[in-house]
Amino acid sequence: MNLAHPGYLWLFLLFIPLIAWYVWCEKHGSASLRLSSTSAFSSTGTSWKIWVKHLMFGFKLAALGCLIVILCRPQTYDRWATSDAEGTDIVMAVDISASMLSKDLKPNRLEAAKQVAKDFVMKRQNDEIGLVIFAGDGFTQVPMTTDNALLVNAIGELDVRMLDSNGTAIGDGIATAINRIKGGKAKSKSIILITDGTNNTGVVAPLTAAQIAARDSIRIYTIGVGTRGTALTPYAQDFAGNLLYKPMPVTIDEPTLQRIASITGGKYFRATGNGVLNNIFNEIDKLEKTKIDVQHFSNTQDNYMPWAYALLLLVLIDMLVEYTVLRRVP
């Protein structure tokens, strides 16, 4: 047991003058009745009430001692507690190719995906989550971490200029995500793949990457982002560097994304709008629930209550005796 405020222990020095005062009062205190001689009472002995009075003084000192200990705040350290929680390993693989700036989602596909991804991360307090980005190739933006604030900040900074945007390497993005997550200790591992296009570059074929993920028991949830039909898509820049947009067909390789999800035991979603995308992440949040034992380390636990109960008991006993056994009749 440790004391949060050990300085209050000096108050125990008050016992010395209190005891001295009590002894002096017992020997020199004024009598209620003066007699010329006490010889007639010499054989009666000391009344048992005197001993009760001394005992009650001891109770008062004990009560004061309890109060001092309470002021010191006795505490226990190094306390571990285990509780059930939901935890899994997740890698978010986000397409940052130039087409993610298309404006069929508001304000564009990438910004819409970033917002729901940040909301998703903040809900997953017990998960290790990593962030992979891909366009012409794949790159680990944030390794596996439980630092949600770091992840949210990294997601907020995603930009199409971070990687070579000439192409969409879905297979490389999945392969990079697998390398991040396969060494994790969680029983449940999953990849959330967000893309708006077709695999048209890269080293690893998407279905080959999916088979590797399935071998390592990694589920892949694939999300095709984009409306059906046409969307305002950037195609060039003007002399000032501003993007130029024109309506272009939305081409998402849904059969491949569906096959990736099927091979790995995941699920395919089509996000045709902001609300749909948000609902998709809510569904994934519900699907990815795995019970784990989480150990919480508690630095301190106050242990003053036994002393408080003892103080209360001593005060009650003292009051009871004072108003019954030691009660003075006027």
Image (cartoon, rainbow, N blue to C red):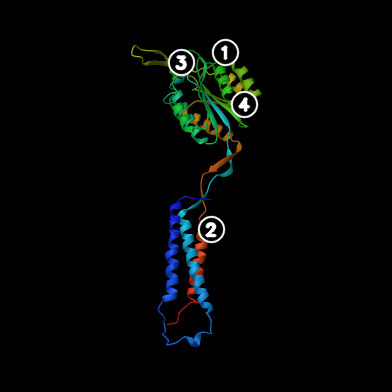
Indicate left or right for 83 with 160 as reference: right
Q: Residue 7: percent from the left, percent from the top?
A: 43, 52
Numbered circle sitting on residue 76: none
Question: Which type of secondary structure does the marked residue at label 4 adopt?
Answer: strand
For the residues labelled 2 and 3, the Cα–Cα distance comes to 75 Å
- As drawn, the residue found furthest toward the left would be 240
Residue ID for mark 4: 218
**Measured along the vertical axis of the image, is residue 252 above or below residue 277?**
above
Q: Earlier in the sequence, mark 2 or mark 4?
A: 4
Q: Give, as a three-letter code, the residue at label 1.
A: Val
In this orientation, which residue lies closer to the viewer: 79 or 134? 79
In this orientation, which residue lies closer to the viewer: 81 or 231? 81
Name the image quarter holding the C terminus. bottom left
Q: Earlier in the sequence, mark 4 or mark 3?
A: 4
Q: Earlier in the sequence, mark 3 or mark 1?
A: 1
Q: Residue 76: percent from the left, percent from the top?
A: 53, 49
Q: Residue 138: percent from the left, percent from the top?
A: 52, 18
Residue ID for mark 3: 248
Q: Give, as a three-letter code, the residue at label 4.
A: Ile
Q: Give, as a three-letter code, the residue at label 3.
A: Met
For the residues labelled 2 and 4, the Cα–Cα distance comes to 52 Å
Q: Which numbered mark, 2 or 3, is in the foreground of this view?
A: 2
For the residues labelled 2 and 1, the Cα–Cα distance comes to 68 Å
Label 3 CA crowd tier, 10 Å (few <14, some 14–19, many 20+): some
For the residues labelled 4 and 3, the Cα–Cα distance comes to 35 Å
Q: Earlier in the sequence, mark 2 or mark 1?
A: 1
Residue ID for mark 2: 306
Q: Residue shown at 58%/39% (left/top)?
A: 294
Question: Which type of secondary structure does the marked residue at label 2 adopt?
Answer: helix
Question: Which type of secondary structure does the marked residue at label 1 adopt?
Answer: loop
**Measured along the vertical axis of the image, is residue 313 above or below residue 269?**
below
Numbered circle sitting on residue 203: 1
